[in-house]
Amino acid sequence: MLGVMWLAIACLASTLYMPAASAEDGYELWLRYRPAGDAHVDAYRMRASRLVAAAATPTQAATRAELLRGLEGLLGAPPPLSEAAAEGAVIVGTPSASPLIARLGLETGDLGREGYLIRSAVIDGHAVTVIAANEDIGALYGAFHFLRLLQTGQSIERLDLREAPRVKLRVLNHWDNLDGHVERGYAGASIWDWHKLPDWRDPRYTDYARANASIGINGTVLNNVNADALVLTPMYLEKAAALADVFRPFGVRVYLSARFSAPIEIGGLETADPLDPQVRRWWRDKADEIYRTIPDFGGFLVKANSEGQPGPQDYGRSHADGANMLAEALAPHGGTVMWRAFVYSDEEPDDRAKQAYNEFVPLDGEFRDNVLVQVKNGAIDFQPREPFHPLFGAMPDTPLMMEFQITKEYLGFATHLVYLGPMYEEVLAADTYAAGEGSTVAKVVDGSLHGYAVTGMAGVANIGADRNWSGSHFDQANWYAYGRLAWDPRLSSRSIAEEWVRMTFAGDDAFVATVVDMMMGSREAAVDYMTPLGLHHLMGRDHHYGPGPWVEGGPRADWTSVYYHRATRAGIGFDRTASGSNAVAQYAPPVAREFGDLETVPEAFLLWFHHVPWDYRTQSGRPLWEELVHRYTRGVDYVRGMRETWNGLEGDIDAERHAQVAAFLAIQEKEAQWWRDASIAYFQSISGLPLPDGYAPPPRSLQYYQSLEFPHAPGSGR
C-alpha cells in the first residue's frame, strides 16, 4: 500500500513538473512563468539557487513541482534540489516536515491551517528564504505568493510577509449542467466531461486546480444551482469523487448543488417535506453515502423556491426548515450548507428588490451553525451596477456569504472587455452602517463585524472548455480578481489588475500602466452604454444579450424591462422611497436617508431609487434626458478609446492574443453603439424630447432595433 502511495505522489509530481508551453493562446493564464527581466534575474538567481522542499505528501509534491516549474521558467533553469541549507536556498514546508524550518522557531500560531509566512533568514551562516506554514496547503499558497513576487518584478531581499485568508470558504459556483451546457457561460461547453469520468481524468482538471490554488480558491461547486437530482446518484458521485481526487492536493474541496426534491425524484419518496421523518432520514443516508465516496466533501449549495425550483415553501415550511434539515445531515461529517437568498415570490410583488429581505430577516438566528446564507451583491440580479444588498448587515446572527458573478451575464458576455474588480471593490467597501459608520460589506462577509465563525464568498464561474478558459483573455482577470478578493476583501482592484497584467502579458511599466488604466475604466463605460444613472434590467429577454428596454408582457411583470425603468412621458425611474415601494427602508437609517433623498442619493443610483422628470437637473447641470444621452455616448467613446489604445500596443505582446483582443474590442464597440442607439431611440419615443445639440441620432428606427432576435445566443437559461 505504501508503495502505491509513493507511486501516486511521484506520478503527480512528474505530471505537474513539465516545461511551460510555448503557444501564447491563454491556456497558461497568469501562471506563464516567462523569463524575468534582466534587471531582476541575477538577483533572483542569487536568492533562489537551491530548493529545499519535501514531497512526502501529494500537496508537498504539488508545491515542489510548482516551484521547480516556476523557477525554471523565470530563471532559465530549475534550481537543484537540496536537503540542507545553502546560500540562496528557498526552503518551503511546515515545522513538522522540515527540520530546518523547525530550527527557526517561527511564530505561526495565528496563521491557521491555510496561512503562511515568507521570510528572509540565516541558517548555518547561509542567507535563505523560508516559506513556512502550519499545514501543507499553507505552504503551497506561500509558494504561489513567492512566485508571484518574482513574476511581478518585486524585490525578494529582506522579506517578512505574513498572510492568512480573511474568508474561510472561497468557492467557485459552476452553473454547469450534466449535459455539458453551461448556463450563463460564454467560454464553450463545460470543462467537466461527465461521460468520460471517472476513468479519464483530463490533465486540464489539474491545471484548473493549480490556477485556483494560486489565488487561494479552496472550493468548487461542480453543477448548476438549477440542479439535476441525478448528480446525487452513485454514478455521478463516483465521477465527482474522481475530480475530488485531482483537486485534493491543491486544497480544493468539491461541493454539489442539491435539488430539494431529490428524495422524490431519485429516492422514491412521495414528499420532500423537510419536517417529514422519512425525508430527513433519506438526506442523512445520502450524506453518509457521499462521505463514504468523497471523504472531504464540502457540502451542498441549494437554490430553493426561486424561479420555479422546488423548496421547503412548497410544504408550508421556511427556508430555515429546509436548510437546517440538510445541515443536520452534513453536520456529523463537517459539511456546510450554502443556502441561496436569491428568491422572489410566485405572485407579482410590489418590488422584487424587497423579496429576499422580507423572507430572510425574520429567520435571523434560526439557521444551524453550519449554514451560510448566500446573498448576491445586489437585490435584483448581477446588474452592471446595483447598490449593495440590504441583507448585508441586517442578519447579525446568521453568517452571510457574498455571491458575485464572474461570468458577465449582463455585461456583454465574453466579447466585452469589462474588468469586474472595481465592481467587487465598490460593493465590499460599501458601508452598511449596521453597527455604526465603518460597518462595510467586507466586514460582514469576513465575519469581523458580527463575529461569524464560518465565513464565505462565492463566485459564479466564467470557466469553460475554450482553450483560454474564459472565452476571452481579459475575462481571466475577473476570475483572478475574485480569488484575490475572496482571500482578502480589503485589497485594491487596481493593484490586483497590475499583478494580473504583469503575469499575464508583460512587465514593462509603461505597458502595464496603459492596460491597467484601460481596465479600470471599462466597467464604468459598460454602465454608461447599458444602464446609466441607476437604470437596470434592460437586457433582451431570457438570453440577456443586447438592449431590450422595450421588453414587456409575458408570465411575470418583474421579468420585463418596463417593470424596472417605469418610463412615461412625465419621467423615468423606480420609486423605492417612502412614497413608492419603500425598499429604501430595508437599509440602516443613515443609508436609507442618503438613498431616499434626491439631494443626497449618489447619482449612480438615482433612477434605482427615484422616479424623476425628464427635465430633472443632474449634477452636471444637464437635464436628465440630456445626461442620459451624454452617458450613453460617453460609454461608446470609451470603448472606441480602448480599441485605439490596444491597437497601439501591437508588438508589445504576442500577436495571437493581441489579435483576439483587438477583434473582441471591435465587437464591443459595435455592440456598445447598438446599445446606445437602441436605448436612445426607445427612451426618446417615450419622452418625446429632441436630442441635445451635437449628438448623433440613432441611424435606424426603433422598430428595427425591436425586430432583432437572437434565439441561439450563448449561455441562455433553459
Image (cartoon, grey):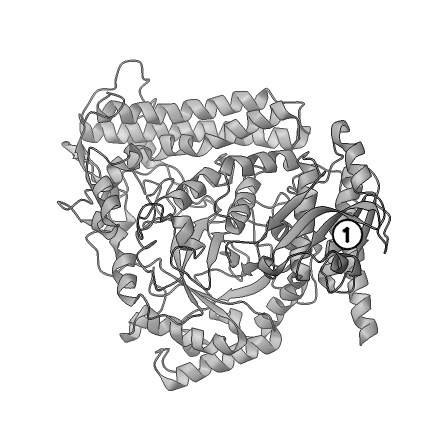
Foreground of the two, 138 or 476: 138
270 vs 586, left or right, is right
Foreground of the two, 676 or 713: 676
Where, by quadrant of the figure, is residue 32 drawn?
Answer: top right
Where, by quadrant of the figure, is residue 391 drawn?
Answer: bottom left
352 vs 520, left or right, is left
308 vs 517, left or right, is left
Q: Which residue is drawn at 51% across and 31% down?
A: 519
The kind of residue tagged 1 is Ile
Task: Give the residue at mark 1.
Answer: 91
Q: Residue 387, percent across and down?
A: 32, 43
**Could one spot residue 59 in this view of the protein?**
yes
Is disc 1 surrounded by few (<14), some (14 to 19) or many (20+) residues within 10 Å? many
Q: Residue at x 59, y 57 (%)?
A: 111
Q: Residue at x 66, y 45 (%)?
A: 160
Is 654 located above or below residue 278 in the figure? above
Q: Which residue is drawn at 64% across and 54% down?
A: 116
Is 331 located above or below residue 668 in the figure? below
**Could one spot residue 27 in this view of the protein?**
no
* Quarter in which the N terminus is drawn: bottom right
Foreground of the two, 47 or 681: 47
